[in-house]
């Protein structure tokens, strides 16, 4: 976990934790949060579409991965446009992650690929074969492990790469150089099975947390794919992030909520409800923490980014 993630959200976390695991109340009732729309300075004639992914790099720059004509955009911490990355490479943008070296990782559910961009925007790693889905291998004199609608990507302390391969109902592990190591999972509702693995994070102990969206749970694994535990009772968990003090945050998109869990998977609090007003959410999806402790949340249906802060 980077220092940015250790500090991110700390101001909210220490207040929410006092709500206790036995009080699954709305965070806005117990913690004075306020929401505002983050105004992004798009070039003339550009628009923001469905915001699927949102991440910040070590400089606090905001990266937005959305379903518009210009899909992967970088802004400074004030929302001033910096650049577009990967023009023409995306069809159905989904997951976005920035690793500890500020490399930018994207997943696209229609091209069936995971792409890694260097901090200066060059493609470094390609996982999957463009426009070809499957569970096996593409072999035309060289071998490429196929993916099917990959939804997210995570990294362990050794730099290994984990892909939530949503349409194949599995997790795929690669070496730091993109070499296939193993996969685990199949469609089902038993431990170790998935009904659309949607998001993935790895904690400081190299435990892997996967949101099993349609089964309404979070499954926890070792780096070898051994099932360790599962957490349930959070609606349909979509995107998950590591928070402060060993906690977790996730979006329950269909309910329009942002949830906060402790390190044992107990609900500490939630914020938001379904709607279009500021402070409501229309399918909240990708989100991340700013250096000032605020939370930036992208929305699929409302085509915007909101910033959540402690009310002064």
Image (cartoon, grey):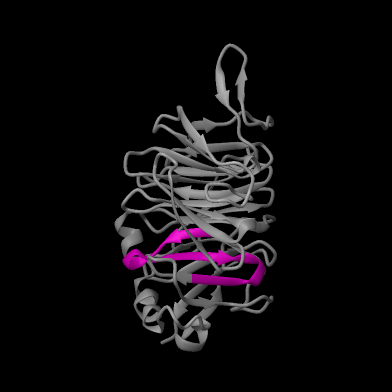
Instruction: Locate residue 203: give its quadrant.
Output: bottom left
Residue 62 shows in the view: no
In the picture as drawn, the residue positioned furthest to the top comes out as 141
Q: Residue at x 68, y 46 (%)?
A: 92
Residue 65 shows in the view: yes
Count of number-bearing discs = 0
Q: Which residues are magenta?
A: 239-259
Q: Residue at x 61, y 67 (%)?
A: 235
Instruction: Locate residue 53: give its quadrant.
Output: bottom right
Residue 110, placed above or below residue 10: above
Looking at the image, which is closer to me, 268 or 130?
268
Inspect the magenta stretch and tell me whether residue 246 lies in it: yes
Q: Quadrant of the N terminus?
A: bottom left
Residue 239: x %, y % from top left: 54, 58
Looking at the image, which is closer to me, 261 or 295?
261
Inspect the magenta stretch and tell me whether residue 75 lies in it: no
Residue 274 shown left or right of residue 307 in the figure: right
Q: Residue at x 55, y 76 (%)?
A: 36
Q: Quadrant of the C terminus?
A: bottom left
Instruction: Locate residue 280: give its quadrant.
Output: bottom right
Residue 191: x %, y % from top left: 53, 51
Residue 91, placed above or below residue 38: above
Residue 161: x %, y % from top left: 44, 39
Residue 185: x %, y % from top left: 55, 41
Q: Residue at x 61, y 26 (%)?
A: 136
Residue 165, placed above or below residue 55: above
């Amino acid at each position: 976990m980077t220092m940015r993630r250790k500090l991110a959200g700390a101001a909210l976390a220490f207040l929410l934790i006092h709500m206790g695991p036995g009080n699954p109340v709305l965070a806005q009732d117990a913690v004075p949060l306020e929401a505002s729309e983050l105004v992004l300075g798009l070039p003339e004639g550009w628009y923001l579409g469905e915001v699927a992914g949102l991440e910040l790099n070590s400089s606090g720059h905001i990266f937005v991965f959305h379903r518009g004509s210009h899909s992967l955009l970088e802004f400074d911490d004030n929302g001033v446009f910096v650049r577009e990355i990967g023009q023409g490479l995306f069809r159905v943008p989904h997951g976005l992650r920035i690793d500890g070296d500020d490399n930018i990782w994207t997943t696209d559910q229609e091209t069936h690929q995971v792409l890694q961009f260097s901090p200066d925007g060059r493609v470094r790693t390609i996982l999957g074969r463009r426009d070809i889905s499957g569970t096996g291998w593409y072999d035309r004199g060289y071998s490429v492990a196929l993916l099917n609608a990959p939804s997210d990507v995570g990294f362990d302390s050794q730099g290994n790469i984990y892909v939530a391969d949503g349409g194949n109902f599995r997790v795929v592990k690669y070496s730091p150089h993109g070499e296939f190591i193993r996969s685990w999972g199949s469609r089902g509702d038993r431990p170790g099975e998935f009904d659309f693995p949607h998001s993935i994070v790895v904690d400081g102990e190299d435990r892997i947390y996967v949101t099993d969206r349609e089964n309404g749970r979070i499954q926890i694994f070792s780096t070898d794919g051994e099932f360790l535990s599962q957490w349930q009772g959070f609606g349909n968990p979509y995107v998950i992030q590591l928070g402060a003090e060993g906690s977790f945050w996730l979006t329950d998109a269909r309910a329009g909520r942002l949830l906060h869990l402790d390190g044992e998977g107990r609900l500490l609090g939630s914020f938001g409800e379904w709607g279009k007003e500021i402070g409501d959410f229309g399918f909240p999806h990708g989100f991340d923490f700013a250096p000032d402790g605020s939370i930036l949340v992208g929305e699929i249906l409302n085509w915007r980014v909101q910033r959540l802060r402690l009310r002064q």
